Amino acid sequence: MEEEKSLERVDALWFPDGNIIIRADNVLFRVFKGILAAHSPVFADLLAFPQPEDAESIEGCAVLQLDDSAADTMYFLKALFDYEFFAPYPAKTDFDAIHGVLRLGTKYRVEPLRRRALEHLASAHPPTLAGWDALCSTRLTFLGSPTLSTPTSPSSSVLTPTLTRSRPQRFAAGPSFDFEHLELPIITLARYAAADWILPTAFYRAIAALTSAEILDGIDYTGVHVEMERSDKLLCLDAEKVLLGDATSDILGFLWSPGVIPTCERTGVPVGGTPQGSNASAASSTTSLSSASATVTTTGAGGIGNSPGFAGMNPCTAARLAMRVTAERWRGDRLWPVAVAAKCPSASKASVSVDGEAAEDGGDENMRDREGEADGEEEGDARAIWGEEDFARLAPSVCAPCLAYMKTDWAERRARFWERLPAVFGLAGWEELGVMENVGRGR
């Protein structure tokens, strides 16, 4: 009797005519056997066993004890018994709901809810580079999220989870939930659900957002300590070396090779020399050569001033090499092959609201000062080693054909990096992961 007084009921999931009480931790839910059995073959088997005469009961109702957390159980049951609560993507939700629905949907084999939760989880983990780039630049406002509150019971120290229905859903492109500080819970959840297609970008974001200590020791999430498996910890530490080493070096390769771009308009115009041949007029009129000495000016490409050390070299090549020297300095700042959104939304100064009202946005700037703070990026976002804004800095020092050639080469290098990303984490390629996703989501 004393124990029963300490138990807490969730009003939103306590049906007076319910015929089974689910207990998770010290939280109770009174629901219906038939609905549980109809949607879950696991519950169908559990409820088929006859109850012993001395089985626990409350108000004449049999009690089924689960070893799942109260929060996960609450979200799962709410999604099962209230179809409006966990709406399909692109409706907005939150990670707590996704976690509970996916974990228990997987465990109890409720496939429609499992697939729905996987779709929400995948919304923050696009398999394409175009999708990832969009994620890193999209402005979103979260409207109508389901909420979980845990007010302290006035009669005990037990926390009472309660559920409220969200406002009417409003849809927007991009992720359906805020993934900030959730790198490890997302990875462990994806591993549990065998959702390998989530992992390449989840691992990539984790490495960029977390310290080595957090990767090794884990973090606390909703009062529970979350750690990856040892194999995944080692995987992340090894992958970090690759991503900050060879991968970023390859991204910058267009600044090294080829020595002279075949379409360059300044062939035969050495730094410190005078224009020669058929390209003389074009070269002499370009803004990246000083009118007095025809030396390459790289103040717009890294801020290192005139570079007399490149005398005799093709001016576009000299500008590229000067920029590469500057970019090599950036590599010490943990810059990545492609940008990583550690917050949702990412690089833009977007605001997130769960109360149905959009907060004021912070502007459109997305340029960073390499030597100082990031103007247009959210604190915590991981910057790329090279971006479109860096081409803008380089543009005054190179001819238009060289700039176009480098942009194409850079895009191809980024695409090549993305194609190889799953292999960095010991995963199957994107195509095979896509097949797995189609099977896992019943498509």
Image (tube, rainbow, N blue to C red):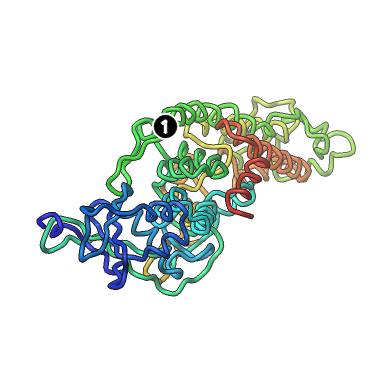
Image-based side of 94 in relation to 385, left or right: left
Nearest the viewer among 37 and 160 is: 37
Nearest the viewer among 312 and 90 is: 90
Rendered image quadrant of residue 246: top right
**Residue pushed farthest bottom?**
168
Task: Report whether residue 290 is seen.
Answer: no
Point out the image quarter for the N terminus.
bottom left
Point out the image quarter for the C terminus.
bottom right
Rendered image quadrant of residue 172: bottom right
Task: Report whether residue 210 is seen.
Answer: yes
Nearest the viewer among 8 and 236 is: 8
Local SS, label 1: loop
Residue at x 37% of width, y 36% of height: 227
Residue 401, given in percent of the width and then of the height, sits at 78, 43
Residue at x 67% of width, y 45% of height: 396
Q: How many marks?
A: 1
Residue 60, given in percent of the width and then of the height, sits at 22, 65
Nearest the viewer among 34 and 293 is: 34
The residue pinned by badge 1 equals: 229
**Label 1 crowd bin: few (<14), some (14–19), many (20+), radius 10 Å:** some
Residue 382, given in percent of the width and then of the height, sits at 48, 42
Residue at x 75% of width, y 42% of height: 399
Residue 286, given in percent of the width and then of the height, sits at 75, 45
**Residue pushed farthest right?**
278
Q: For the residue marked with disc 1, what is the amino acid?
A: Glu
